[in-house]
Image (tube, rainbow, N blue to C red):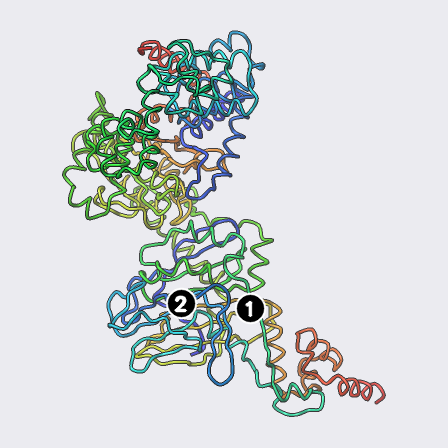
Amino acid sequence: MTRIDLSGLVVRPSQVWGGVRLVPLVRDEPVEGLRLRREVYARSWGPDTVDVGDGTAYTSYVPHGFVADWGGAPGAAYGTRLGDEPPVAVPVRRLARRRRGEPRLRFLPLHLAVEGYLALHFGGPSVLWDEWSGEAVRRGLSPRAEAAYAGWEVPGLAEALGVFEIHPGQCGMMLYVADALAAAFVVPHPDDYRLLHATLVEDLFGELVHQYAHYGAPVGDFAASLGDGAGVSSLADLRRAAVRAEREWAEAHDGLMARDLLETPYAFERVHTMGGFRLFRFLPPFLRSGQEQHIGELISDCRGRTAYLKTFRLSEKQIRRGHLLRRLADTDWHLGRTAEALGTSYAELVARITRAGFGALLDHHAVARRLRDSEEG
Amino acid sequence: MSDLLAAEDVLLFVNAAVTATGQREFRDGAEEQRLSLGFLHEYVRVNYRPLYAAALALDINDHNAALIVEQLLRSSRDAGAEEVRREGRLIAARLARLAPQRVYRLFRALRAAGVNNRRTRAIMRDWLAARPDLAHDAVKYRSGLKAAARHAHAAFTGDGGETGDFLFAPRRRARYGQPVLEAFRRARHDQGALYELPFTVAEGFAARHGVDREVFLKRMTSRMTRLERLRTQPTATGLSVMPLTRLALYVLSLSFEARRERREELTGALRAAARRVAGPHAGSWGRVAAVLDDSWSSSGSAVKRRRPLAVALGCHFLLEALAAPGAYAAHWTSGARDPLLVRPWGATPLGARILDALDGSADRLVIVSDGWDNAPPGLAGEVLRVWRARLDPGHRIPVVHVNPVYDAAVFDVRRLAPTVPTAGIRDAEDLPALVEIARFAEGREGLPALRAYLDRRVELFLEADEGRPA
């Protein structure tokens, strides 16, 4: 599995509000056997701290969690809980957690994806070259941090979601800001979507999306056009022309606007198997070709069709960081060989590492010595 | 050219004055609506003052009527003597029809704006003099009347100065001769007296005395206005007297089960209300097809809850009454079949529904929608344009679009296509009159025809006013 497969989902005409374009994805038939619902964790305001037990404290801000239910319980909608247990507000502050024997998985939206990105080569240098500091060798990239904006901080997004008219059978949404794909969201069932639509405003969005929304101009509608109506001699002709106009938009969208998301080969990592469904997270190739790069998480059914999808668009800076880490790892963290592979000089590579925020990993005396040596040599 | 432009501007203003209320809509905030409407009023007043005043004679909503009066009085010096006289008659006639609380609010706005010319004072005094019972107003609209009297230098001489004393020197008299003033005085310490007061005033006293709400409502029933009764005891109110749109709003506020249970009763009431509105025109429109918008945006906003949908529902029953028996076809955008169970939901595939409607054999097509055609965007306009150009070049089937939502960004209601006349609508009851005015919006009749139409409406309006009992 290397690509995202959105077969079964049909693109419907987009709805525009200011600079935000929302493209609904509609299923003819819901995915059988999997439901997704939202779980709001009872908590006080502010970040939540959980003592994991081994002396580690895990601090997180969690707007809500998702519960994937493949037990075949029909119509499990918001707030429904099966069994006679008291309402569960389990602090699932792990990747994804499943209780023993229960056909249900609790996970936090985008948590898997973001953690996958943060943990990229988290262990640090695999070979102890003397330019790496002792700290880097001992603790790896820790602490590793990335910043993101909550949905309500993205100007215009909340209004756009509020005035959006959900289509019958809608199971997903592609969100564009200034016509750049910001996020894709797919769920298995239309009822789930109607309940989870509003939670998009609590999601994470990258710096890029925030900037585009801030500075971007309003985008135009893709208005249907029937031309001058030549060849229309009856109402049936007119109806055919109208259907054609709608199909043209769907093709234009898949081929033009969502191409980078759908055609990029991703590195998928399986996190969980639940019945016939598998939960993955994926990372992009971190190419610096100017294409969009998304990280995300996905549940696919046994035939590989997507039942659940949530993506996060990386900003240029984040792509650069991922790219740099990948290249370093490819050459076993040897600075000289990495510089060669990147087609740049040793000094420039050091500058890039520093700019990317990894300066603390370098032993600057060793680096300076190496630079002096190479100059003298 | 300038004539056409003027006609367009005036129609645009009429559309705005019918629909906009300065409140939040589904897409615009209250502030945007107010700003946009304020600009429009000023623009039309400065450029087309006589037509601006004539708008008072049309079925515009009360919010805009009050705004027009305020604007006219604020700019008295821009009008000539003859114009002032004509405006004065229109203003007096309109104020007589406005709800008193709105007039008091208008007076307060004039006071806040520092408008105190002789003309304004005369208008205020005339209006106050025509009030049937000032003592009742003194109790129910106490601060409003007080402010108005102060501003207009009005004297209360009718009842031996009792009302004046009640407002301005409440300690001067130990008791009053007027029953309502006396009841207000006694209600402070006597529970029995509060049942002689107007409902809104009695409510405050009842809370102070700790009267049980149930008992209170039961005993107050006879003293409530119709709307108060509807608000407090919806089930006990006779549905047969309610106006069409109000009734539609009430039906939409009920749960699906309640609507199903009371299907006969509700449908009967809606049909009866529609027949009352249709009057002599019932059954005279021939075969009618309607496209009605029940998309999510027809849910309105928190302050105008389900208003667009209620207008569509009212239009549904009204068109059914206007069409020849059995010759009416409704096409809801969601594909709903049962009008009583509509709910605001889903996208707006107007284009596809218009195709469905044209497919039948209709003599007339009416579209009720907020104009946000989004599945796909713009298809409705394209369908109507191509259909007109290729399949109905002779204008055999008239199409009219009525829109209940003012769009602040375009200073008008949103249009579907330039070839389709669009009119703003506030109450479904106004539909027949709007279809008449919509023909000006097609751009085929110019300003003289519009002016003649307005003059006729003004005459009818003033005649009706003079015929009213003082």
Numbered tag placed on residue B315 in the rendering: none
Relative placement, left or right, of B200 versus A256 is left
Is B379 or B136 nearer to us in this picture?
Answer: B136
With respect to residue B67, does B311 lie above or below? below
Task: Answer yes or no: is residue B286 visible.
Answer: no
Chain hosting mark 1: A
Residue at x 41% of width, y 45% of height? A226
Chain hosting mark 2: A
Residue at x 39% of width, y 65% of height? A40
Residue B424 lies, in percent from the top left, at: 39, 31
Relative placement, left or right, of B253 versus A361 is left
Quarter of the image for residue B104 reads top left
With respect to residue A177, does B323 lie above or below? above
Q: Amino acid at mark 1?
A: Leu
Kindly identify which residue carries mark 1: A314
Residue A300 lies, in percent from the top left, at: 36, 74
Mark 2 and mark 1 residues within 8 Å of each other at the beta carbon = no
Q: Secondary structure at mark 2?
A: loop
Kindly identify which residue carries mark 2: A41
